[in-house]
Image: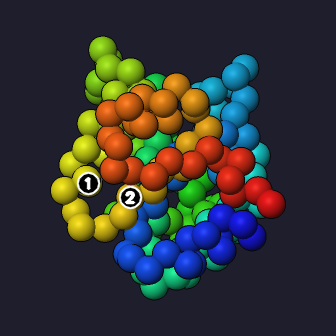
Amino acid sequence: MYFYNLIKDFKEELIIFVDMDGVITDYDFGNKLDFKNKRPLTTNIKTLKKISELKKVELYILSICKKNIEIKEKNIWLDENAPYFKKENRIIISKEKEKNESSKYLKYKYLKEYTKEKKKIIVIDDDNEILKYLHNNLKEIALFQDSSLID
């Protein structure tokens, strides 16, 4: 419970953005578009559920997908496997709508708006390229690799 203990000891209010692919779901390179059948990563899901119960934490999904249809599939998957992510806190961005933008830029663009809030922002992702980009462009955000969720 390393990550949970770290979060519960924060004194300030927190907004935590969690990626889906590779963080709370198995990431299968050969079957990217079949999201509804992805294997849940139960250890991470349980840790995040416990974190979601902390009063000072707002928990969000921030995920990118290739096709619009995946937005529905990801929401169905969340309803079944991690329903504690409130529907209004699920930000799933389709590249079909943003064809010329990289995943790292799309996440940056969305998170940049949240840096205006007075709360501490934490991002959990498994993609080192995204984490590096955010580190270089949004210094005020705390970044964690998905492995931080595992004891």
Q: Amino acid at mark 2?
A: Ile
**Numbered circles on residues, count:** 2
Residue 22 left/right relative to 117: right
Q: Residues within 10 Å of mark 1 (few under 14, many from 20)?
A: some
Q: Position of residue 150 (x, y in %)?
A: 76, 56
Is the N terminus in the top left, top right, bottom left or bottom right quadrant? bottom right
Q: Residue at x 62, y 38 (%)?
A: 126
Is the C terminus in the top left, top right, bottom left or bottom right quadrant? bottom right
Q: Residue at x 56, y 43 (%)?
A: 125
* Front-most of residues 7 and 91: 7
Q: Position of residue 69 (x, y in %)?
A: 45, 35
Q: Secondary structure at mark 1?
A: helix
* Front-most of residues 18 and 70: 18
Q: Secondary structure at mark 2?
A: strand
Q: Give the spatial CA distance, label 2 vs label 1.
A: 8 Å
* Front-most of residues 59 and 6: 6
Residue 101: mark in rendering: none
Question: Do the CB atoms of the residues marked 2 and 1 lie less than 8 Å apart?
Answer: yes
* On screen, residue 137 above or below 145: above
Q: Residue at x 66, y 64 (%)?
A: 3
Q: Can you name the residue that lies furthest to the right here?
A: 151
Q: Is residue 144 visible?
A: yes
Q: Residues within 10 Å of mark 2 (few under 14, many from 20)?
A: many
Quarter location, residue 16: bottom left
Q: Is residue 67 visible?
A: no
Quarter location, residue 42: bottom right
Q: Residue at x 57, y 78 (%)?
A: 8
Q: Which residue is mark 2?
A: 121
Q: Earlier in the sequence, mark 2 or mark 1?
A: 1
Residue 114: mark in rendering: 1
Q: Amino acid at mark 1?
A: Tyr
Q: Position of residue 147 (x, y in %)?
A: 71, 48
